[in-house]
Image (tube, rainbow, N blue to C red):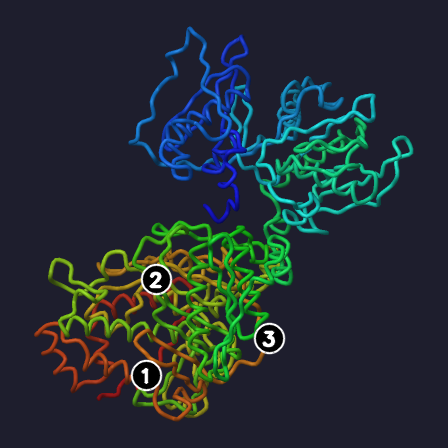
Amino acid sequence: MKKKKGNALAHLEKFTAVQQLAIFAPDLTITVTQYNENQFFKASTFFRGRQIEAIHKGKKSARQALCSKIIKQFKLLDEHRGAGASESMSIGMHLEEELPNSESNSFKSEISSDHLQSMEVVTHMEPELKSEQAGPLAKAHGYTGSYNCSNILNQLDNDGRTVPKMEGQAQNMDTSYVNLMPPPVINHTRSVPRNNANEEYKLPSTGISTHDAKTPTSHLFEKFKSGVDFQFSDTIRDDNTGLFVIQLGFTDGVMFEGYGRNKKLAKHHACAVALEARLHMGPFDLPEGCGLGNKQSKPGTSSNSFIKPTDAALLNQIDSLIGKAKKESFPSPSKDPMYVEPGRIISRVNELHPGIGSQIVCTQDEGKQSLFHCSVNIMGTEFLGHGRAKKQAKHDLCSKILRDMHGYNLKAPRAGQEIFCSEDIQTRGRVADKMQDAIVMKFNELCTNGVDAHKMKVLAGICMTREPVTDESEETPTVIALGTGTKTMTGDYISSIGTAVIDCHGEIISRRNLKRYFYAELQKITNGEGLASIFERKDGQGKFALRDGIKFHLYINTTTCGDARVFNPNSDDDFEDFNIGKGSRGILRSKIENGEGTVPIKKEESVLTWDGIIGNARLKTMSCSDKVMRWNVLGLQGALLNQLIEPIYLSSISLGGLYHRQHFPRAMFERIDDIGLDLGSSFKLNKPMMSPCGTEEPRRAKNTPPFSINWCIIDETLEKIDTVTGKQTNKMSSRLCKRELFQLYLLGPVVDKSYATKIQEIKTKSYLDAKNLSTEYQSVKNGLYEKMKSSNVGYWVKKPEEFESFAI
């Protein structure tokens, strides 16, 4: 909260009760209705589980009294101005509730402290305008209160024209809505000068006043995207007044006009008017010569007069809005004012924080593959950025400032970016950003010792959290495993003793390292350090399970290969997108040997043989989309570990690029959601939270490096695997190969005597025999394969038994 408000909390004395409450409850909606014929109005709202009401003469006074009542009874000011500040109402301007004598006891109900749960309400709001300032069309329709888009639409509806209702509008009730911290909205507020051209008018300003020396033009460039959301017309001189006139037009068709003694002052005046009308910012201290009058504007006021629009022009404007409201139920993502293009991230930070460049501290690590680090302190908050070059580190730093401090969206606005929330995790996207920050930071930290990190195309990692996962959580996720890579081993280097890693894709490598971490945590129990382990035995018997609250999260800098990629990410056209992949969506796919991309699996190609691979048959491996989908059924632990622990599932999947709300969930679980799986008593169809990250990973149009990097939290250094041979670059077997994992199973945790006896028997058997001891796991897995066949999802390619028949 504090970071997003800037200096607002330091200027509470200047605000009214309405403005103060806006800081603490920006999404609150207040409804004002006429209480009786004596001009008494009732303001009401739903705040923290209770209905709050206040009565006062006049609409504004009723709102003010209601906000005072909420601030006082909920002690909202105490945190920032000390105990007793809310009760004494010593800060800002406040009104006590004024009730009619006959009703003095009707609404004096105290707030119970038992109901302190807040409610978010989606609102639509417009600034009010005095009736004498309304245009001719407004008067023709009988407007006496607000003169804005919302009221115009409501009135036209009353006159028999069909228009869509605004969200949150009450039915059969004369109400006016006030939003305490309004976002930019379509606004038609235009004041009309009287006969005296030099007479000045002031639009009402209900927002927080500016408190710095920035010009209105600077504020406008900060709040909107120059050249996209608005543009200035040519400046002309008015023959009647001798003043320069400039028009400020927005992409939604709304025009504002400014006047000044010169072109620059006219531009400042137009920007001040637009900011007051659209964002409730102001009033501004405009210099002499701004506005219709040549007199110096008084401090805290601005001259905001416009040339009177013709009735026809205003009517066309209204009709255009009505058509737009029918066509669009929400703003187009391409016009998102909070989106910043990657090339403008650094410049936008410089606009928001002038002079910040001189405050940024840059350092560089020692070594050949050293990292650059940039840091800056803004209002007591430390921001850090990292990169292989100084500019990249500064870009990373500025991205975090815009995202975390100002709420900007750094991901390209395109269709399908909606988040898939799970039962456990509800998020607006910040959870994915936390996972991305943790993985990228750890990877850059590890790649300072000679590893060519800049050559990687896919980076994946698995994080662990112990606290409830929310956007507001301050817990830093713990990085457990990392992996890079986009290739699979070639058939020329197949191994019958389990010493080669076949699949070197980043997410697969990360999951193999996660299994090593599970063995290490079980070993703690063997060593008598059970309290330090993430596992515990429920009720002291059965398999081990994760301790309460522990969750695992997968991050990938791009979407998984296979079914999740069968769409056109740059098209919003359903028909065009349908032709990408046509009927192959939802179908199992295999990776190409020692290459990139996937292909659908034909029935005759689903069976691999050892002699066939030796004889130059392609070594097929299931796509990452298919493998992650299988994890969502069988868990992350695999067949061997399933004999010791309960299935463990991903709680979230975050993508740095190529996320699509329709296609990614389909690939992860939807295509097998209704095929009638028999999951037994231990397994389930997992549906994790899925979200794009706020900072989009750039496309790397480079040749894929012939190596894969992996790391686990139990390791001291990175390991590099040659993706052609499936072994380390020094020809030694990888710590992730089947043989090494089987060693951990045989020589690892001795959790009880019965398990120790079973291990002695297994030592004489093969790796495949040990996997088959997990009978329930194998039964659910084989059932999944059969159901996918019968449901036309596809055929799962199984490796020849010779790959897993080795013994130790």
Q: Amino acid at mark 3?
A: Ala
Residue 82 locus on image (x, y percent): 38, 37
Instruction: State the residue position of label 2.
Output: 650
* Nearer to us in this view, 468 or 12: 12
Q: Amino acid at mark 1?
A: Arg
Tags 3 and 1 touching, CB below 8 Å: no
Q: How many marks?
A: 3
Query: Reading the chain from its start, which is encountered first: label 2 or label 3?
Result: 2
Tags 1 and 2 touching, CB below 8 Å: no
Q: Amino acid at mark 2?
A: Leu
Quadrant of the snapshot with the N terminus: top left
Camera-near label (1 vs 2) is 1
Instruction: State the residue position of label 1.
Output: 735
Instruction: State the residue position of label 3.
Output: 701
Residue 236 locus on image (x, y percent): 87, 41
Q: CA distance from mark 2 to mark 3?
A: 30 Å
